Image: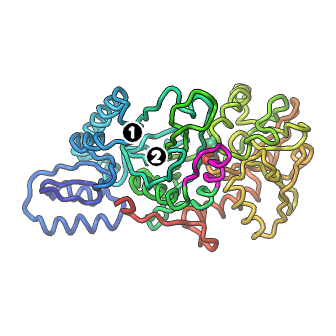
Amino acid sequence: MKREIRGLYFSHTDERVALLLLREREREKTKTDLEKMMASNASSTTTTMVFRPTVSNSSSVVASSSASSSSSAAGRRSPIMQNNKFSNNNNEKNRILNRRRREKRITRGNLAVNNAITRPEIDWSKLGFGLTETESMYIAECTIDGQWKVGSIHPYGNISVSPSAAVLNYGQGIFEGMKAFRTPEDEIVTFRPDENAKRFAEGAGRMSMPPVPKDIFEDAVKKVISANRDYVPPVGVGSLYIRPLLIGTGAILGLGPAPSYTFLIYVSPVASYFKGGQLSPIDLIVEEDYHRAAPGGTGSTKCVGNYSPVLKVQLQAKKEGFSDVIYLDAKENKYIEEVSSCNFFVVKGKTIATPALEGTILPGITRKSIIELARDKGYTVEERKVGLDEVLSADECFCTGTAVVVVPVGSVTHRGKKTVFCDGKIGATGQMLYDELTGIQQGRLEDTKGWIEHVPKDYHL
Ligand code: COI
């Protein structure tokens, strides 16, 4: 009879290994569990530990470490996963192989034990913004005329769609970016998920897709975080990036909305977006030939097609040594719009200016939060047109976004002329706002605004 202790299964207890676990373990509560287990199993010989960060129940399917439960998970896949025989087989094989490797390391009883008990084997010190696959993802499906129903957790893996899926042919799809954090009390929290739900629903409307109701969205976010709880980085190291997608997966040839849709959420632990570390100032170049969005277009929607057109200039800028690109308005080529992945702020004395939301830039949730925090701190914040001339004479500039958080701008280059801010270091305003925002997000500062949502430990059960 196996006993589960926070995701580990013990067929018998072993005092030596259990003591090692006790020493290595970071969480006081687990230590108590182990002590309890040791007390009730005094005479034992061998230990089998299986890492299983998620738990399954009858109505939903989640990752598990054993081959048999993985295949039962495959048996209950959603339609978009069932057809994908080739990639599913490979995924399943890889998953089993990876788990076997992991289990082997775990039973050796070295430092990996510690990592494996509390979290998967991730070197948190090397975390950037690359994708780290996790155990599971959330999937729900809906037809154009139907109602969204609560979806379920599935093993993370490739999905299968028709070659004529609307998202592949006509870009009918939107996404979101949000984060979950581990607090000093070892709780998991999300930041303003209601705002993401709202923006997701607005985006769906713009792209003629059935909006996901707020309660289903928020429930899904909690489920997928809870199922991947062990992938939330240690406090202060980074966060669990949450990527909800709403895509037209139904087949269509003539231009029109897809007959059916998939709402999917996957997650990945992340740290700093830009190379060089979170508060390392970025060097930007002003782009005058290409535009990110035009009035009446979809610049304010997080639709899939908004992002790949920036790659051409972004890649060129990176080749030239810049971190990213500032886009100007398409009409007059004069006013700041945003950077490829984030909103832009200019500081002059106690006044902060940021481009107004006029349909061509993304209504960032970090942007909105920073405006509120800055006003609380006595700054005047103006949402209006911000000319390039203002940027070049600013005291300091910074960018905001879910992925980038608050990142200082070290320099802006325009027509070959480089303007450096704060001697290339982070400015006082950017630093203060970063500290305020991340303090609330990580549970180090009081959440007086009700921005934080707790994710119960076994929410998906
Ligand atoms: C985010 O900040 O969450 C985004 O979705 C931007 C993306 C380009 C990483």
Residue 451 on image: x %, y %: 60, 66
Q: Is residue 273 visible?
A: no
Front residue (pair 134, 58): 58
**Element type at marker 1?**
helix
Which numbered disc, 2 or 1, marks the residue that appears first in the sequence? 1
Name the residue at 70% across, 25% down.
Answer: 319
Q: Amino acid at mark 1?
A: Pro
Amino acid at pointer 2: Glu
Q: Is residue 201 magenta?
A: yes
Specify the quarter for ligand 1.
top right
Rendered location of residue 54, percent (x, y): 33, 52
Viewer-side residue, 252 vs 213? 252
Image quadrant containing the N terminus: bottom left
Circle 1 residues within 10 Å: few <14, some 14–19, many ≥20: few
* Image mark for residue 1: none
Residue 133 in view in this figure? yes
Query: Does 211 lie within the magenta span?
Result: yes
Residue at 71% across, 57% down: 431
Image coordinates for residue 47, horizontal then vertical, percent? 15, 51
Residue 79 numbered tag = 1
Magenta segment? 199-212
Q: Left or right? Give the position of 184 relative to 36.
A: right
Any mark on residue 141, and which?
A: 2
Q: Is mark 1 within 8 Å of ligand 1?
A: no
Q: Quadrant of the C terminus?
A: bottom left
Badge 2 vs badge 1, beta-carbon distance below 8 Å: yes
Q: Secondary structure at mark 2?
A: strand
Residue 23, relative to residue 387: is it above or below?
below
Q: Is residue 223 left or right of residue 194?
A: left
As drawn, 260 above or below 210: above
Q: Quadrant of residue 5?
A: bottom left
